[in-house]
Image (spheres, rainbow, N blue to C red):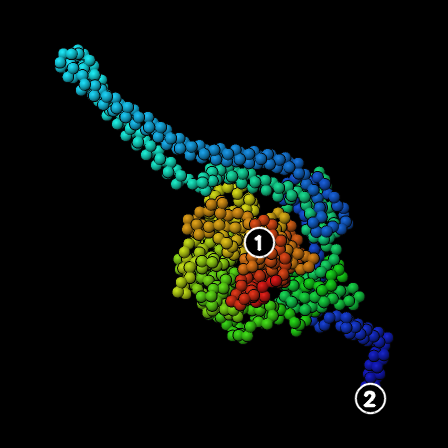
């Protein structure tokens, strides 16, 4: 018992030692701190994040000397402010020369127009004079014939009078002999007179026929057409000079570097007098505050959030302020975490990047570390998206119409998934089928009907049919991006013309195809490669006038060696032409380009393109992205509405200077007021689509409503209906 008592006493001594008490106090303090911290934290599932640092790097497009930098480090600038000026003297001189050449060419055109007009007048006068000359000469020879005939009759009468007198030897015979000689001369002359009359009658008939033929072949209205045809070479020369002028003006404008967005000048990397290197930054501009937070989560959590998911953001500055936001989109896969959020600087940590747009701007500084919690039970479009991706293929959905315009997952039957990829990029309502005809970026599967000439059909409830629609008369097509229907019932489909990831531009990727629908079947009535037709014209100036002056990045080979950057994703019928909306390129000023293609039936019949048939129809400024981070957008679809307005879908383009203003995709819908003619369009944004790519829009069977489809590559596509914007 003593031993045990001693043992027990020894144990109580250890528990009561100052060291033990200190350890217990520390443990309790940590527990209390953890509890307090949990109160400040936005919940159990909190993830590390950082306020996005946005930098702009204005750079030169060509080698040129830096003339002036009108900003200083620390200066605040707005979007569009001039931050650097390159030397313009050489380009300005070249532009002056081209302007002078253009003025001269226009003067030559006017002089030739006057000359051709006078030539037509001269030709008509020549025919009229020919008829008049024939008429005068005919009168003269007829008069001579009548005179000779009358003179012969008189001589013959005198011969008859003198014959009895000479026979009675009352007069010498020489008188009668002279008269008979005169008669013989006149008798020989009369047939010649008759031949002359016949000849001039024939000449008059021919002259009159020629005059009539000229008047029939060249009436007044056709004379002007003939003049215009004669002026075509001069106009072509002027077009080349105008294209050169536009190119130089674009290059000249590019020598004035402007800030892409609001920010503070952080670094100036060159000085006046230095030579700017194309693509290298001249200065760095940083946004002063952040509206986006980048959180890093596990794969499991990434699969549970999507565009619209609510989030709570708490800065790690002990201020306790809670910020609300919504998920804007997910990045492109797992990536390394930034240094400032690492648990240990010596560790390598990775996560899926999730972009969150804050409701309140200007609170976080770029680079500030935060904690993020996601409200997975919130009212968000992401819940619908993730549920759709998790649902089994071919599941049956309720037939009830949508009551809101939030994008939801399309119903893609398993039978269709097994036959083809479903990546909707455009659609058109076809009443005969009571379906939307949908074009898909890719058809078939690798090694199984890949690039088959198929279209998809979808009903008004977003349900795809079990199988594709096969098109007769086409061997294959690839990367179809747009579809529209002409008033005569012809269905037109167009491939993107873009270069593939491998740098190739094969012919099936460049097709324009006209389709006829009969007895429920589709048949190609004509097809041609638009890129090949562009290359065949072989006119760099004309291509530059269309906005095609840059080489496609990564280009290796393609149809007819056509190497220009080109990606067409929108098409609609307008009057007697197709309007083509370019996703890329955009102009140097960031404005999107719309082409007009007249007589497309001639192109698909002959494979040839007349320069007069394709021209820039309009340029329009489209901007898409979160508030404060908007960038230039390219056209992903367009539709001419019955009231004359034009509806456009725009997809945000990544800046070429390497800046990442926001992660993920962003698209928007715009309208252009009627009459939407040629020239500069002014677009009004009517709807944002954060985190997704709106690829196709079309009026449907219900008056006043639109169907919009969203391509999500390998994921289930989305769709929505919405009222036609007012």
Residue 676, given in percent of the width and then of the height, sits at: 57, 54
Q: Around disc 2, counting alpha carbons within 10 Å, would you say few (fewer than 14), some (14 to 19), or many (20 or more)?
A: few
**Looking at the image, which residue is at 45% across and 40% down?**
220
Quadrant housing residue 544 = top right
**Looking at the image, which residue is at 34% across and 36% down?**
209
Tell me the quadrant of the picture where the C terminus can be found.
bottom right
Residue 528 visible to an observer of this rendering? no
Residue 8 visible to an observer of this rendering? yes
Quadrant housing residue 16 = bottom right
* Residue ranking furthest to the left: 168
Q: Label 1, on which residue?
A: 676
Q: Depth check: 632 or 147 in front?
A: 147
Residue 263, given in percent of the width and then of the height, sits at: 73, 53
Q: Secondary structure at mark 2?
A: loop
- Viewer-side label of 1, 2: 1
Q: Label 2, on which residue?
A: 1
**Looking at the image, which residue is at 37% across and 38% down?**
212
What distance separates the C-alpha of mark 1 from that of mark 2? 106 Å
Quadrant housing residue 714 = bottom right
**Looking at the image, which residue is at 66% across and 42% down?**
255
Q: Earlier in the sequence, mark 1 or mark 2?
A: 2
Tell me the quadrant of the picture where the N terminus can be found.
bottom right
């Amino acid at each position: 018992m003593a031993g045990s008592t001693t043992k027990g006493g020894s144990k109580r001594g250890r528990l009561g030692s100052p060291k033990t008490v200190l350890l217990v106090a520390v443990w309790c303090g940590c527990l209390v701190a953890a509890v307090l911290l949990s109160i400040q934290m936005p919940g159990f599932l909190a993830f590390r994040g950082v306020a996005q640092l946005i930098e702009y790097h204005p750079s030169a497009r060509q080698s040129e000397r830096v003339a002036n930098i009108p900003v200083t480090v620390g200066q605040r600038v707005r979007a569009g402010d001039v931050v650097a000026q390159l030397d313009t003297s050489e380009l300005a001189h070249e532009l002056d020369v081209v302007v002078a050449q253009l003025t001269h060419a226009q003067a030559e055109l006017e002089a030739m127009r006057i000359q051709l007009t006078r030539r037509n007048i001269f030709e008509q006068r020549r025919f009229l004079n020919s008829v008049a000359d024939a008429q005068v000469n005919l009168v003269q020879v007829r008069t001579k014939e009548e005179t000779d005939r009358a003179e012969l009759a008189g001589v013959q009468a005198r011969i008859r009078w003198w014959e009895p007198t000479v026979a009675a030897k009352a007069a010498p015979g020489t008188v009668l002999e002279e008269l008979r000689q005169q008669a013989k001369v006149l008798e020989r002359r009369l047939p010649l007179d008759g031949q002359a009359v016949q000849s001039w009658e024939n000449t008059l008939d021919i002259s009159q026929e020629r005059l009539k033929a000229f008047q029939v072949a060249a009436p007044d209205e056709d004379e002007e057409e003939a003049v215009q045809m004669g002026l075509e070479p001069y106009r072509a020369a002027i077009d080349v000079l105008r294209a050169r002028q536009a190119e130089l003006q674009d290059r000249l404008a590019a020598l004035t570097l402007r800030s892409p967005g609001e920010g503070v000048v952080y670094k100036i990397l060159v000085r006046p007098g230095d030579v700017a290197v194309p693509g290298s930054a001249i200065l760095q501009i940083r946004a002063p505050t952040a509206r986006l937070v980048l959180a890093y989560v596990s794969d499991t959590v990434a699969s549970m959030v999507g565009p619209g998911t609510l989030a709570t953001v708490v800065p790690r500055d002990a201020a306790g302020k809670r910020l609300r936001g919504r998920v804007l989109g997910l990045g492109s896969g797992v990536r390394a975490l930034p240094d400032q959020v690492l648990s240990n600087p010596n560790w390598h940590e990775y996560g899926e990047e999730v972009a969150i747009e804050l409701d309140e701007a200007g609170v976080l500084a770029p680079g500030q570390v935060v904690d993020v919690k996601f409200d997975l039970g919130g009212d968000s479009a992401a819940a619908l998206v993730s549920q759709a991706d998790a649902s089994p293929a071919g599941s049956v959905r309720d037939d009830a119409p949508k009551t809101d315009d939030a994008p939801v997952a399309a119903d893609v039957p398993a039978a269709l998934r097994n036959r083809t990829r479903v990546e909707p990029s455009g659609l058109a309502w076809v009443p005969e089928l009571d379906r939307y005809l949908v074009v898909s970026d890719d058809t078939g599967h690798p090694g199984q009907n890949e690039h088959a000439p198929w279209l998809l059909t979808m009903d008004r409830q977003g349900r795809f049919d079990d199988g594709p629609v096969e098109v007769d008369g086409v061997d294959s097509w690839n990367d179809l991006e747009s579809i529209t229907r002409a008033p005569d019932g012809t269905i037109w489909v167009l491939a993107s013309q873009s270069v593939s990831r491998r740098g190739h531009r094969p012919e099936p990727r460049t097709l324009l195809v006209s389709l006829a629908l009969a007895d429920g079947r589709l048949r190609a009535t004509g097809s041609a490669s638009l890129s090949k037709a562009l290359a065949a014209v072989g006119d760099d100036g004309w291509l530059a006038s269309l906005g095609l002056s840059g080489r496609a990045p990564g280009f290796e080979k393609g149809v007819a060696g056509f190497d220009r950057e080109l990606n067409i994703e929108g098409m609609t019928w307008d009057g007697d032409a197709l309007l083509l909306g370019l996703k890329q390129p955009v102009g140097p000023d960031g404005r999107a380009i719309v082409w007009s293609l007249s007589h497309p039936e001639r192109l698909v019949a002959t494979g040839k393109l007349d320069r007069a048939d394709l021209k820039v129809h309009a340029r329009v400024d489209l901007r898409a992205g979160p508030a404060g981070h908007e960038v230039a957008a390219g056209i992903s679809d367009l539709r001419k509405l019955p009231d004359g307005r034009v509806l456009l879908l725009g997809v945000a383009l990544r800046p070429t200077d390497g800046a990442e203003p926001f992660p993920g995709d962003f698209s928007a819908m715009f309208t252009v007021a009627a009459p939407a003619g040629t020239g500069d369009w002014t677009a009004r944004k009517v709807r944002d689509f954060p985190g997704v790519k709106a690829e196709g829009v079309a009026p449907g069977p219900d008056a006043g409503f639109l169907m919009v489809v969203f391509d999500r590559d390998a994921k289930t596509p989305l769709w929505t209906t919405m009222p036609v914007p007012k």
